[in-house]
Amino acid sequence: MGCGEFLVKYILFFANLFFALAGLTLLGLGIAAQVKAVDLTELGLTLAPVSSIVLGSLVFFVAFFGCCGAIRENNCMLVTYSIFMLILMILKITLATLIFVNLDGVLNQIPQFLKDSFNKDPQAFHDLESSLKCCGPAGYISYMPAAFLPDSCCASTPCVPINAYSGCDIVIKDFLNTFSLVIGSIAIAIAAVELVAVIFGLCLASHIRNKARRGTY
């Protein structure tokens, strides 16, 4: 085995070992978030945990092919791995593009979404307030002219406007804005690493195939 082939093989192996661990981490975080959000399903807030579970499982599966293909020098597994990596790279670039293009539109829809949820199921909305530490769709004013607010609106009782949390629209907008920009930036960075992994995987697969052909002569 030449020095170049040795380096490519083990760089690919350890890179995919990292991807496998990252996939398991995403899977674990998604499961934990899903368990925590089980009471908020009526508000449609479980999409992110489910996406994390699916993405974590997919990343682990693809990384498994990469690790096994590299360490066993299996041409079929390496080609399969490279194809999956290329698909994941395209999906991540698409995800990042959609995030950056549509983020403002999504944020602008948050107030109406919260208002509809508040009117549809007040009890479920109180659970949301307790979880996110926020008060009403637009703050305590959403409960006016009531003299007292629900306990979920405050950190202490009695719950009155002076010690109420900020509106849920502000809290969720800040969270989504930060979370989305971070996810979009990370997606682009990972896509760049995946492109390198695809090139390494195909190069190693080609070298293994050529070596097998030479061995038949």
Image: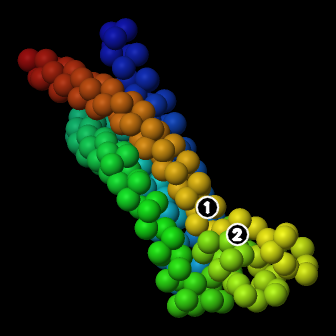
Foreground residue, 188 or 14?
188
Q: Residue furthest top?
A: 3
Q: Residue at x 31, y 31 (%)?
A: 195
Q: Is residue 65 above or below residue 121?
A: above
Compared across the picture, whether 198 is left or right of 56 comes to left
- The residue located at (43%, 23%) in the rendering is 11
> Neighbour class for label 2 at 10 Å: few (<14), some, many (≥20)?
many
Q: Nearer the viewer, residue 31 or 112?
A: 112
* Quadrant where the N terminus is found in the figure: top left
Tell me if I can see residue 161 in this picture.
yes
Tell me the quarter of the image containing the C terminus.
top left
| Mark 1, secondary structure of its residue | helix
Residue 21 rendering spot, x and y as whole percentages:
54, 44
User: Where does residue 127 sit, x and y in percent of width and height?
Assistant: 68, 80
Q: Quadrant of residue 90?
A: top left
- Residue 134, label in figure: 2
Question: What's the mark number on residue 170?
Answer: 1
Q: Are marks 1 and 2 in contact (CB under 8 Å)?
A: yes
Residue located 84% across and 78% down the image: 160
Looking at the image, residue 91 lies above or below residue 11: below
Instruction: Give the structural element (helix, strand or loop) at label 2.
Output: loop
- Say which quarter of the image contains residue 29: bottom right
In the rendering, at what x and y percent does residue 125 appear?
A: 63, 82
Q: Does 24 sit left or right of 196 as displayed?
A: right
User: Label 1 sits on what residue type?
Assistant: Ile
